[in-house]
Image (cartoon, helix red, strand yellow):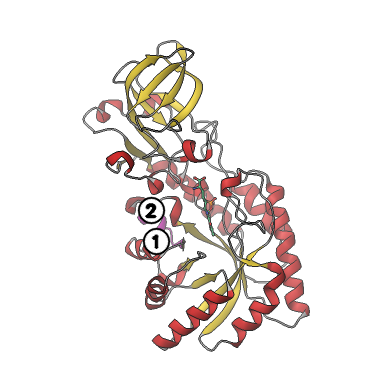
Amino acid sequence: MLKGDFPVDRFRGLRTPFYYYDLPLLRRTLDAVQEQLDRNPDFRMHYAVKANFNPRILAEIASRGFGADCVSGGEVQAALDAGFAPERIVYAGVGKSDEEILLALRAGIARFNVESAAELEVIDSLAASMGCVAPVSLRINPDIGAHTHAGITTGLAENKFGINYEQLDEVMELALGLEHIRYCGLHFHIGSQILDMMDFTALCNRVNELVVRLQRGGRPVGDINVGGGLGINYQHPNHLPVADFGAYFDTFRRHLRLPQGTPVHFELGRSIVAPCGSLIARVLYVKQGTHKQFAIIDGSMTELVRPAMYRAYHRVENLTSDEPEEVYDVVGPVCESSDVFIKEFAMDRCRRGDFVAVRSAGAYGESMASRYNCHPLPEAYFFEG
Ligand code: LLP
């Protein structure tokens, strides 16, 4: 959505800050994913609910027949409420509580992505108490580094996620021996905002290695879930609004060596929803500091924590002004020095009351909002197209 396409006149009656979602862009993105799935009949998509669980967004994605990837009982429930079929819901997480496991068993989800031997035993006993069998994949920590920021790598041995791949045989033995566990496959996830396809190639090589190891040991392989992680272009939201799904899926098609017909599951979150969302805020004050000029907006780290938490880049646009650019640190009102969206950033001259859009905020924006400083949670509005 170009600057001039934001309906600023309609924004005037709304309380800022709020999220604004471009549904036609979400639909174009989902079409692009579907086009890839049509070319690769063994590929299955489970949208990562953590990226954005706004009911309207979830319903749009569920209507495509995609599955859901969840990391809590709350997310399983949100996915069910939005219309995702339970047999397409997968559930990962290092710390599933008994209550969450029971909810997922009752719902009849497709898969528990199990992250430790201890968890396997708990799921077995809870399934026994319900007289059912739990479908399980083993989440393996592949010890693959992803070239992204340290806060969002997940597949290194030092990260808390998954079962150390050296212990695969041992845990597999346990899984196969438990009466209320049905072993179904392997699960991986190496991190997020990954733009270097070599990282995914490295994951494919690790998967191939483990598959051969299982086959040599005469063990079942089942299906393969490679997680999510495809990045988007935060620098150019207008020129490159749809992620490079072609390069991503091609990497797996070319590098995975699996028995014919093995289903391959994907759990993309960010690349599906990030581009379609903007945080809309109003300029409260422009302040000249000793060395800097600050544009103080009413949006903050409580609505969008990514810049404060990961020093993540989000492009900021002044939607109201066409005046010559000036350089600003764009900051929020929260009592934390880290409540900064962007530093030393040139944008059209700001005046009190101008609307600004913080772009590419559809993933891990609204879903990570907090009530810090007693801020209300942000509302969401939709451009229907
Ligand atoms: N599958 C698993 C097991 C995951 O842990 C994640 C994300 C995904 C799939 C989806 O990854 P995506 O396609 O969205 O990269 N809050 C951080 C990102 C945390 C990602 C956590 N796991 C951020 O704002 O950058």
Choose between 7 and 184: the one closer to the eye: 184
**Can residue 383 be seen by looking at this rendering?**
no
Query: Does residue 365 sit above or below 56 in this rendering?
Result: above
Left or right position of 138 against 56 = right
Which range is magenta? Answer: 59-68
Mark drawn on residue 100: none
Residue 375: percent from the left, percent from the top? 28, 39
Callout 2: 10 Å neighbours few (<14), some, many (20+)?
some
Mark drawn on residue 75: 1
Q: Residue drawn 61% across and 84% down? A: 176
- Asked whether the beta carbons under mark 2 and mark 1 sit within 8 Å of each other, the answer is yes
Q: Secondary structure at mark 2?
A: loop
Choose between 200 and 95: the one closer to the eye: 95
Q: Residue drawn 76% across and 67% down? A: 209
Residue named by callout 2: 53
Left or right position of 27 against 169 = left
The number of callouts visible is 2
